[in-house]
Amino acid sequence: MATTERLDRYRLHEHDWESFEALREWFEWEVPDRFNMAAYVCDRWAEETPEATALFVEDHTTAGDARGDGSGATGSYTFAEFEAEASRLANHLAASGVGHGDRVGVNLPQKPETAIAHVAAWKLGAVSVPLSTLFGPDGVGYRLADADATACVVDESNADALRRARDEYNIGLGTVLVVDGAPQDDERAYADAVAEQDADREAVETDAEDDALLIYTSGTTGDPKGVRHVHRMLLGHLPGVQTNANFEFGEGSRFWTPAEWAWIASLFDLVFPALYYGRPVLAYHGGEFDPEAAFDLLDRYDITMAFIPPTALRFMMQVDSAGYDVDTVEAIGSGGESLGESVSEWAEATFGGALVHEGYGQTEANVTVVENGELAEKRAGSMGLPAPGHEVTIVDPETAEALPPGEVGEIAVRYEGDPVCFVEYWNQPAKTDAKLRNGWLLTEDLARMDEDGYVYFESRKDDVIISSGYRIGPEEIEESLASHEAVADAAVIGVPHDERGEVPKAFVRLADGRAPSEGLRSALMDHVKDRLATYEYPREVEFVDELPRTSTGKVRRQRLREREGIAD
Ligand SMILES: Nc1ncnc2c1ncn2[C@@H]1O[C@H](COP(=O)(O)OP(=O)(O)OP(=O)(O)O)[C@@H](O)[C@H]1O
């Protein structure tokens, strides 16, 4: 097996931490020359704790029911079973010609095969390419063609989209395996393909700098970019994830996220860190996000740590949770967009005693700013402090020079020696050059930092609204609107205005049972005016049935600008 050293610096849960500062001072990176993620999240546990559970599985879709008794299929995989299945798939892929550095698409929902497919690719030294099942033919086609993938594992729910993508895009896929569905043409059924293989294949020795993951940005601001990550990136996540999760990775811990296993935050803030520590993760496949089901799962599986994005928490706020016992939940991590005080307060009250922590990151450099309410006070409006091991500062967006505390500028991460940072954008050297300047990875997000290092998110560089010379972040207005009882969801953009240059315009989805009216429109404007600066209230409010969001739940303000005819 590829060597697996103990790497003590990442076992943060074995310590009693007194302060965030002490932890930050103590922590230093420990990246071995040879490091293969598959050896650490799978193979080692198959040897050390083969009977421990790696995955709990619950599937409520048609495919799940077909395997079960009509009430959905449930089951689990021990680490020994997880490893055996990953070995079988790796053997099939190897027999089909997949080798070191080749790209393997993973277009699956939350199913055991998703984690298995990533691990199988890494065992071979190949590169996994996570793909959302919400992508249609263009989403899948664009990414697989761009990645020049040689194989893809797809779920029956997305097999048709992949078929159309193969017709319409120039994708040289030699191998397509269909999970839980009928294969067509040159495709094969996943189950048949793995059944005929040996359950024995060790992870190859890889360099920590070898490619492991080609993951696409959410595409919130334009065409998604392929982000090249190498094996060390998992280690780069661990201190931030551990801190955010309040070190809840000890024995008895159980993990779940409702976020699709195609996004960096679900895969590397939860799934693979949990498996790195030999702890089980729930793979729940139930179709669209259902807030009641979320409470039910937290209750039935005695989940101790969950990563729940703000959008999902906002949906959970709308249901009555009184009948669910969620006392096992010790920590909730959230992020990907601003969490907001009202959601955070609600979550802390609902999950009595649980710590709710916002984290900040992006596909290129994830979990670099974190909260930990036990080690450092939370500060209103802040996402927390630079995570252990990461140097984060605010720079002038023009010069990439550091700015003094209190000034708004661009969040920057020192990338040299930081294992969480990406290598480059795939086939986009000009974009990489613009992203890495003066030793800093520029996040394209605006924020300020106080004297003590707390980071306060303002907005994405592209979303900032300039009204009468004031710079306004849409998130603050959205948060203010969301705190009104009639509002379920809100998004804000800047629209042109003769005198002021731009003014904020809000798109509002009302809570169930509330109807649009002129009275409500002005009540919402007054609500924001009361709470924020007068120049910040939305001069226009449009009621909508739905807001455009990415597959990761982020609001696509660019789409709203397009609708208004003001996109760049
Ligand atoms: N806690 C947070 N608060 C506010 N925004 C956040 C937070 N965490 C992440 N974000 C936002 O999400 C972004 C990272 O998202 P991701 O890497 O998934 O792709 P994207 O930036 O949405 O896509 P694209 O680059 O294609 O537009 C961050 O740069 C930031 O704008």
Image (cartoon, grey):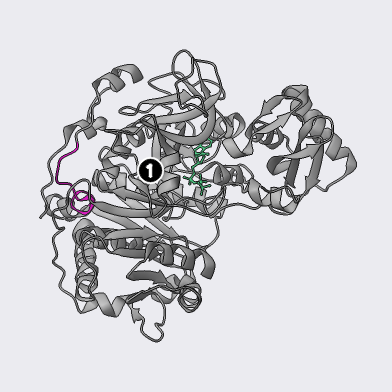
Check the image and report above or below for 335 versus 94: above
Check the image and report above or below for 539 versus 264: above
> In this picture, which residue range is highlighted in magenta?
31-41
Label 1 crowd (10 A; few <14 / some 14-19 / many >=20):
many
Residue 403 visible: yes
Check the image and report above or below for 178 versus 353: below
Residue 204, percent across and down?
14, 58
Left or right of residue 45, residue 357 in this image: right
Quadrant of the drawing holding the N terminus: bottom left
Residue 119, percent across and down?
26, 58
Check the image and report above or below for 472 versus 407: below
Residue at the extreme top of the image, as rendered: 451
Residue 136 visible: no
Residue 383, percent across and down?
49, 28
Q: Pointer 1: what residue?
A: 269
Q: Amino acid at mark 1?
A: Asp
- At x 26% / y 40%, what residue is drawn? 235
Choose between 274 and 533: the one closer to the eye.
533
* The quarter of the displayed image where residue 540 is located: top right
Left or right of residue 330, residue 527 in this image: right
Choose between 206 and 359: the one closer to the eye.
206
Choose between 286 and 141: the one closer to the eye.
141
- At x 52% / y 20%, what residue is drawn? 379
Q: Secondary structure at mark 1?
A: helix
* The quarter of the displayed image where residue 349 is located: top right
- At x 39% / y 53%, what residue is drawn? 215
> Is 356 part of what is drawn in magenta?
no
* The quarter of the displayed image where residue 519 is located: top right
Residue at the extreme bottom of the image, as rendered: 185
